[in-house]
Amino acid sequence: MAGVIAAETPDCLIVTGMPGAGKSTMTRLVGERLPRSARLGGDELNGMIVSGFVWALGEPADEAARQVELLHRNLCALANNFADAGFTPLIDAMVPSREKLGFLLDLLADRRVLLVVLAPGIEVCRFRNTIRDPRERFDFDGYEELDAAMRREFGDVGWWFDTAGLTPEETADRIVREARDRALVN
């Protein structure tokens, strides 16, 4: 079973990428392929804020940064709790920089962490975002800047996985099979 995400020693899998890259779809599909898993969606956790929510690029910027930190703390607390209970935590979150990744890794210090950066390309992400349910669509026009920043920040950290030519099912199967060998961060 070398290479396969193993249930007996739950890894923590972080799946990131630009809006429309497939983070939510992949964490759900990968989770379905594992015997014990928990999908931890950043959007869902942010949705728990009933009043006063400021999105990551919103204003005031200091409040946006505070809420991103709160989100990351909550995602990692849940991931640690699920891993301690024998579940593989699958974190679906936008992680735009090495600094943010480092913060997550510090909070997951006792875990083996795998990072998959879904990278199907800007045009694929834009298209996928347009065909989403309108309630799930993410109005975003900074793809070029975000892609450049993520590539600059992460370099060769984690597994940069070009999924443009794969079905969601093929992508999930490869993540389950190959992530332990290709995505190890710590």
Image (cartoon, rainbow, N blue to C red):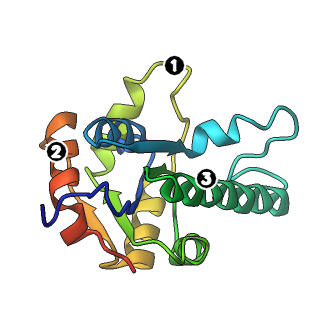
**Residue at numbered disc 3:** 78
Local SS, label 2: helix
Determine the CA span between mark 1 and mark 2: 28 Å
Crowding near pointer 2: few (<14 within 10 Å), some, many (20+)? some
Residue 17, by quadrant, is: bottom left
Say which of marks 1 and 2 sits in front. Answer: 2
* Label drawn at residue 173: 2
Crowding near pointer 3: few (<14 within 10 Å), some, many (20+)? some
Local SS, label 3: helix
Residue 5, by quadrant, is: bottom left
Which residue is painted at 61% across and 52% down in the image? Answer: 78
Q: Earlier in the sequence, mark 1 or mark 2?
A: 1
Residue 173, by quadrant, is: top left
Lateral position of residue 150 relative to residue 103, left or right:
left
Nearer-the-camera pick, 178 or 99 = 178
**Residue type at mark 2?**
Asp
Give residue 103's position: percent from left, percent from top: 61, 74
**Residue type at mark 3?**
Leu
Say which of marks 1 and 3 sits in front. Answer: 3
Q: Earlier in the sequence, mark 1 or mark 3?
A: 3
Give residue 86's position: percent from left, percent from top: 44, 53
Nearer-the-camera pick, 69 or 30 = 30
Q: Earlier in the sequence, mark 3 or mark 2?
A: 3
Residue 10 visible at all: yes
Give residue 104's position: percent from left, percent from top: 57, 69
Viewport quadrant of the C terminus: bottom left
Do the residues under discs 1 and 3 have CB atoms within 8 angstroms? no
Give residue 118's position: percent from left, percent from top: 31, 54
Nearer-the-camera pick, 117 or 87 = 87
Local SS, label 1: loop
**Residue at numbered disc 1:** 134
Which residue is painted at 15% across and 51% down in the image? Answer: 174
